[in-house]
Image (cartoon, helix red, strand yellow):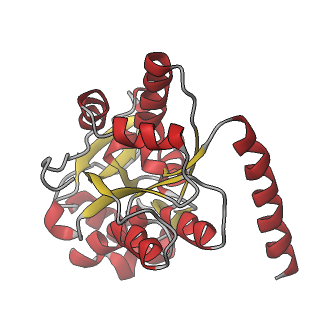
Amino acid sequence: MLAKLLGTLLLLASWSAFAQDAPVIAAASDLKFALDEMVGLYQKQTGKEVRVVYGSSGNFYRQISQDAPFQMFLSADEDLVFKLADQGLTIDRGALYATGRIVLFVPKGSPIKADTEFADLRRALADGRLKKFAIANPEHAPYGRAAMQALQSIGLWTAIEPKLVLGENVSQAAQFAVSGSTQGGIIALSLAMAPSFANTGAYVLVPESLHQPLKQRMVLTKKSGDVVRAFHAWLQQPAARAIFRRYGFVLPAEAQS
């Protein structure tokens, strides 16, 4: 318990120092490549700088609840934004910016084939080809929870659970899958589509009917300043929306955002 408390205090101290240079934003790790591109474009267009920390939405929810100095939160689970709003920690209930998708990914050289019916994954569990399988931790990562729901829907959760390698967030789970340390995994489409993941393996979309929608919502915290508020507005403009779309996110209708 003491070690955990000290770790939290050190993180808060580092974030406070970090925030002196530029406002800090907490973002779900499925946004890593898309949001990095947006931040670069925003800085080029406006000369304004924001800094982004990536991680699991559940962990960020807890940290913001404990007064972490984030000025904005881009969550992969809109319910976490609603909970922060109910605690009076945000300026409103946020804006739906996208719906995420998950994919079944297999790295190059894997003995498993990716198919939307999970047929070969099922056979690999039975014949011993599958040794390890990566997903994000369902306890605090929305993409991990969606992966668990999909595996439960097709009746594979009980068989595959002992072989799971859990990433702290979906970005870490993707690294496990891409590195070949597992024979496959369920990761975010936005990561599988990133240029740095090109030619590292194959993937197929997991049918949306197998899991609850990954509705992703962003919100300004009560700590937000003018720079972050301007960036929040910019993320809802055509230039940012085009980047979201290019990384496989499903965009909300204007009336829903």
Q: Quadrant of residue 123?
A: bottom left
Q: Quadrant of residue 143?
A: bottom left
* One can see residue 200 in this view: no
Residue at (31%, 46%) from the top-left corner?
189
Residue 58, relative to residue 34: is it above or below? Answer: below
Q: Residue 96 location, x and y as percent?
A: 27, 56
Q: Residue 191 location, x and y as percent?
A: 40, 41
Residue at (86%, 74%) from the top-left corner?
3
Judge by depth and name the residue closer to the eye, 255 or 153.
255
Q: Residue 100 location, x and y as percent?
A: 28, 53
Residue 72, relative to residue 33: is it above or below? Answer: below
Residue at (40%, 66%) from the top-left corner?
142
**Quarter occupied by the N terminus:** bottom right
Q: Residue 86 location, x and y as percent?
A: 42, 79
Judge by depth and name the residue closer to the eye, 118 or 65.
65
* One can see residue 72 in this view: yes
In the image, 43: left or right of 121? right
Judge by depth and name the residue closer to the eye, 100 or 74.
74
**Residue lying at the far top of the rendered structure:** 44
What is the total number of numbered labels drawn onto the structure image? Answer: 0
In the image, 255: left or right of 7? left
Judge by depth and name the residue closer to the eye, 161 or 227.
227
Residue at (29%, 37%) from the top-left corner?
244
